[in-house]
């Protein structure tokens, strides 16, 4: 059966994931070392140790995301995160930075290393470099590949692959996006925050809800319409087209979430080891519902049964789902 | 700013006359007592909120006659009015059903926000921190009230279960969520 890797932003969400059937849970420390550094979220050292014990007692693994890029001169925070994750009994750490990978490989030779999606390793050469240089055992593939491309990559590498099957989508090269830091000075890659809440402001203006990120008005949602996350990449902007005529729309990406449920059998056939659910910033209600649905789906795939669809529509951003690049017809 | 709902009123001779509001001070004392009880039983809430615990949250349950001002670091939850709300840093608006479902993890806060069932204004960091801290605390409103009620606790639990069945509101935490749909 494919491994189901599930998000947990809090100890309660971790327990909910375990209870709902997660094979592995990924989480992070409450600081800049992980890409979901949101207010009130994440784990202290003690909470991680308790979470690992809880998961292990029930046959689940815990992976610790330390997947931001350390600032020069401030590496100690990231180094201690790796050491503390190992001390807490984590089954693997998920890293993106090449320097941190080198550090972990040298100082923590018994710690299993996974390559974060933030490293954007999207071809066999890049993946093999990480595997040969640092002993990376699993790579989380960026959300830009088709199922056929994933199958082709798997034929040329000797490490496990993990792919996202549900949750928020990034349209940019992961780990390279500068939109959030352009608008706010804070980025997912360095500070662990995409569109930090400290820079988001909502207001009702003339019957519509306006969302601002920093100085930018990024959405004006009519009353009763579905609202997206306040990220620039999902923003609705007015700009001139090629003929100079003004148009308003989602310039970068429509606000929709990934739901690749129906592609699970194809991903299994493509040699994918693990399926990942996005959403450490979401509640334990989200975790419980999504994990339960996907656990049933991977069990159904294992038995060769058809995949269900549309069960989780309400939980998706924009309440719309897409199979993203996995089944893309565009280039 | 968000649109402020008017306080409850009735039409008398074609003119809108405000209904008398519930007695504010006793209700505020009761709510603040509950607040202190919850924070004592779940100290992680204030720890998770950090500096945002000092924020003032206007909680506007739109199908209740009054909004409430939540001040976590002061351990205070007071009743106020829509006409003259006190200064606040952030405002959260929605129906009672949505607030209770979110509290008991039957609905996801982001999903309620996507669908417009919950609206926020003001300091977004504080709202996110409060949501995450409450979600981790796994609060059960009925249990909080029952433990506060002492000897009347068992009767309160029975009354809550009855109310839950009658109204469909989520009044307690059910450990096992319902399957989205069983397709096994």
Image (spheres, rainbow, N blue to C red):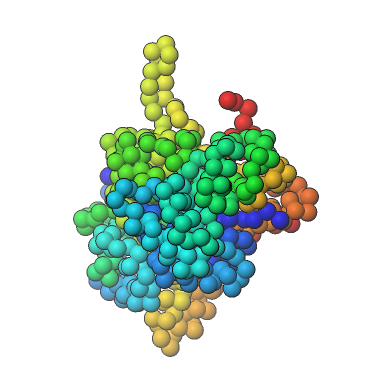
The percent position of residue B59, horizontal first and vertical second, equals 33, 58
- The N terminus of chain A is located in which quarter? bottom right
Q: Residue furthest right?
A: A304
The percent position of residue A221, horizontal first and vertical second, equals 41, 37
Does the rendering let one see residue B30?
no
Q: Is residue A146 above or below residue A286?
A: above
Question: Which residue is at a point 32% across and 62% down the rendered structure image?
Answer: B49
Q: Is residue B153 above or below residue A94?
A: below
Q: Residue furthest bottom?
A: B151
Question: Which residue is at a point 47% across and 40% down the rendered structure image?
Answer: A174
Nearer to me, B106 or A110? A110
Question: Which residue is at a point 51% across and 68% down the rendered structure image?
Answer: A89
Q: Is residue A73 above or below residue A214?
A: below
In the drawing, does residue B3 fall left or right of residue A152?
Answer: left
- The C terminus of chain A is located in which quarter? top right
Nearer to me, A329 or A293? A329
The percent position of residue B27, horizontal first and vertical second, equals 30, 71
Image quarter of residue A290 = bottom right
Q: Looking at the image, how many numbered discs can be counted on the residues?
A: 0
Nearer to me, B93 or A96? A96
């Amino acid at each position: 059966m494919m491994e189901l890797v599930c998000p947990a932003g809090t100890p309660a969400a971790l327990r909910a994931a375990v209870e709902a059937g997660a094979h592995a849970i990924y989480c992070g420390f409450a600081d800049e070392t992980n890409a979901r550094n949101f207010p009130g979220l994440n784990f202290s050292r003690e909470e991680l140790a308790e979470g690992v014990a809880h998961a292990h007692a029930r046959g689940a693994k815990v992976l610790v995301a330390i997947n931001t890029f350390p600032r020069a001169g401030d590496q100690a925070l990231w180094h201690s995160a790796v050491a503390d994750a190992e001390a807490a009994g984590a089954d693997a750490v998920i890293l993106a930075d090449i320097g941190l990978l080198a550090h972990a490989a040298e100082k923590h030779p018994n710690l299993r290393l996974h390559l974060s999606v933030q490293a954007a390793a999207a071809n066999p050469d890049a993946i093999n470099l990480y595997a040969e240089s640092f002993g990376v055992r699993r790579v989380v593939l960026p959300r830009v590949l088709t199922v056929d491309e994933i199958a082709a990559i798997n034929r040329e590498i000797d490490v496990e692959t993990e792919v996202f099957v549900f949750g928020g989508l990034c349209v940019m090269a992961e780990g390279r996006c500068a939109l959030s830091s352009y608008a706010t000075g804070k980025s997912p890659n360095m500070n662990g925050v995409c569109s930090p809440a400290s820079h988001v402001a909502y207001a009702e203006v003339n019957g519509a809800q306006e969302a601002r990120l920093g100085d930018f008005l990024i959405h004006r949602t009519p009353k009763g319409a579905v609202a997206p996350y306040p990220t620039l990449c999902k923003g609705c902007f007015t700009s001139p087209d090629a003929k100079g005529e003004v148009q308003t729309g989602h310039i970068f990406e429509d606000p929709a979430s990934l739901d690749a449920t129906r592609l699970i059998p194809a991903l299994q056939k493509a040699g994918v080891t693990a399926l990942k659910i996005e959403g450490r910033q979401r509640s334990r209600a989200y975790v419980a519902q999504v994990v339960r649905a996907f656990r049933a789906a991977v069990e159904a795939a294992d038995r060769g049964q058809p995949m269900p669809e549309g069960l989780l529509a309400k939980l998706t951003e924009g309440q719309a789902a897409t199979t993203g690049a996995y089944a893309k017809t565009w280039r | 700013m968000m649109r402020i709902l008017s306080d409850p009123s009735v039409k008398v001779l074609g003119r809108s006359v405000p209904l008398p509001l519930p007695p504010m001070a006793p209700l505020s004392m009761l709510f603040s007592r509950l607040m202190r009880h919850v924070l004592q039983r779940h100290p992680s809430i204030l720890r998770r909120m950090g500096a945002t615990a000092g924020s003032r949250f206007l909680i506007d349950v739109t199908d209740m006659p009054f909004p409430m001002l939540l001040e976590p670091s002061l351990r205070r939850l007071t009743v106020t009015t829509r006409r003259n709300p006190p200064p606040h840093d952030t405002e959260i608006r929605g129906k009672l059903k949505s607030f209770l479902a979110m509290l008991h993890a039957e609905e996801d806060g982001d999903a309620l926000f996507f669908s417009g069932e919950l609206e926020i204004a003001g300091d977004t960091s504080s709202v996110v921190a409060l949501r995450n801290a409450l979600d981790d605390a796994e609060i059960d409103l009925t249990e909080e009230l029952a433990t506060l009620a002492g000897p009347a606790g068992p009767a309160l639990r029975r009354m809550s279960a009855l109310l839950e069945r009658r109204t469909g509101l989520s009044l307690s935490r059910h450990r096992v969520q319902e399957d989205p749909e069983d397709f096994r």
